Amino acid sequence: MKQKYTEKPIDVVLIGAGIMSATLGAMLQQLKPGSKMAVFERLPEIAAESSDAWNNAGTGHAAYCELNYTNLRPDGSVDCSKAFKINEQFEISKQFWAYLIEQGLIESPDGFIHAIPHLSFVHGEEDIDFLKKRHAALTQNQLFKGMEFSTDQAQLQEWIPLMMKGRNLDVPVAATHMRTGTDVNFGALTRKLFQYLSTQTDTEILLEHEVVDLKRAEDESYWEVVVRDLSNDERYSVRANFVFIGAGGGALELLNKSGIPEADGYGGFPVSGQWLRCTNEEVISRHHAKVYGKASVGTPPMSVPHLDTRIIDGKKELLFGPFAGFSTKFLKNGSWLDLLKSIDADNFVPLLEAGYRNIPLTKYLIKQITLSPEDRLHNLQEFFPEARMEDWELKIAGQRVQVIRDDEEKGGVLEFGTEVVHSVDGSLAALMGASPGASTAVAIMLDVLEFCFHKSMTTTSWKKKMIEMIPSFGQHLSEDALLCGRVKNRTKRILNIE
């Protein structure tokens, strides 16, 4: 087997051409200009899996509207800690994007981000009381300044006319409204980032190239990455000082092949998604918001229904969902054997334990799989009372792999967030999981940098560059109102989302 880049190990190998690899690559090239990088993507296109606009909710998760990020405590108060964390992580992402645009490294923010109000919508006295408490708790912090709460039908009619027309007004409803929400096309953003990397840095992007194996050198001085060129089925190897596995659902298999002990006990549970996409331009024009409801009792976080305005490739779209499904594939373009191949001696017991603890999830998926078109329409009509079946089509979304890890105390635990696994020496890192994912990509990559490049991150030059890229670096917007206002005003202006 021949070897590419034979002189010495290259600096960085990025596996998967999605938003995570693109973000880490862009950050590293700013921190260490001239780094030699190679990106390997098995598909013929960039951002064709989870980062694609049709495969990703694109909400720009900021916890403005996602009710599952705030929970009631036993004493009846609202725990906002997760909402504050996620909101600040998204603000970090926006700061980095603004820096890239300000430096002329990527162009046209309107090609990937737009201002779209974020709303939470509930009905019934119990949920209205929760929403009111949530609003009161969130707005005590400057991160959520400007969020409005209302039960007034006239106000709701102004915010969400499509959802209020034809509604039974005998049932009380309420909403919170955040004008400064966003819609993000992460596929478009990913392509812009890779355009920067391929044209302005020493980065080679190889499409239709699949990483099939990872091996640590005997002296542990580098990683040997075995790659298959899908155009001719030839294999070659690449030596790299650092490897990042950002391959979405494909990360688990490669992590296991790396042989690092930190990967032991990890498994994955695949969940597919579906959307109802509106095909009636008149209906689409009457709604301009991302509106999240409340998940039914006993259902997982992924079941939260939402009616979303999207801007995809310059065109306004309207989606409702998500509806879940089950597939044994770990990627939308993966193999039906992915789940079976992921099971080994290290994760077999955690998988069984997680399955036993999450029987409600299994029941939920079975129920979702058996939904009829009429069932989906009924769910939509709870949001949009006058919805008609002929105005909507079913569209398959991306494949997500929920992380299952072996917890020393609890056994197999199913995680609904994102998780970074890295080798003890920091030479390899892998990202697994799902929402909020893409929205918090920059914050997640900061965690990778802090561990895998810890020595460099303590140097004056890297610290100075980090503050230039992310003005709030090392500080908390949730704790500094002046900094929060200054940073938010800057990003709104540069990203044109005022």
Image (tube, rainbow, N blue to C red):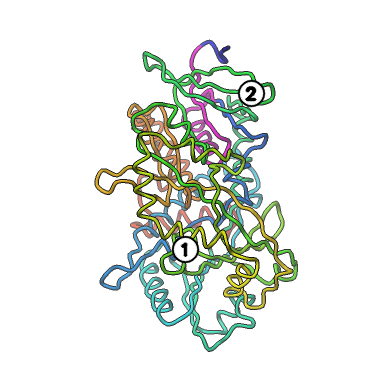
Q: Amino acid at mark 1?
A: Glu
Q: Residue 434, how many percent across, how many down?
A: 48, 49
How crowded pointer 2 is (Cα within 10 Å; few <14, some 14-19, many 20+) is rated as: some
User: Quarter holding the N terminus?
Assistant: top right
Pick whichever, 89 or 169, lies toward us: 169
Q: Residue 422, how many percent across, how many down?
A: 38, 33
Q: Residue 423, how many percent across, how many down?
A: 36, 30
Q: Amino acid at mark 2?
A: Asp
Residue highlighted by disc 2 = 229
Tell me whether circle 1 and circle 2 mark residues in contact (CB < 8 Å).
no
Looking at the rendered image, the disc whose residue lies closer to the viewer, 1 or 2, is: 2
Magenta stretch contains residue 22: yes
Compared across the picture, whether 315 is left or right of 319 comes to right
Q: SS for tag 2?
A: strand
Mark 1 or mark 2, earlier in chain:
1
Magenta stretch contains residue 288: no
Residue highlighted by disc 1 = 66
Residues rendered magenta in the picture: 8-37
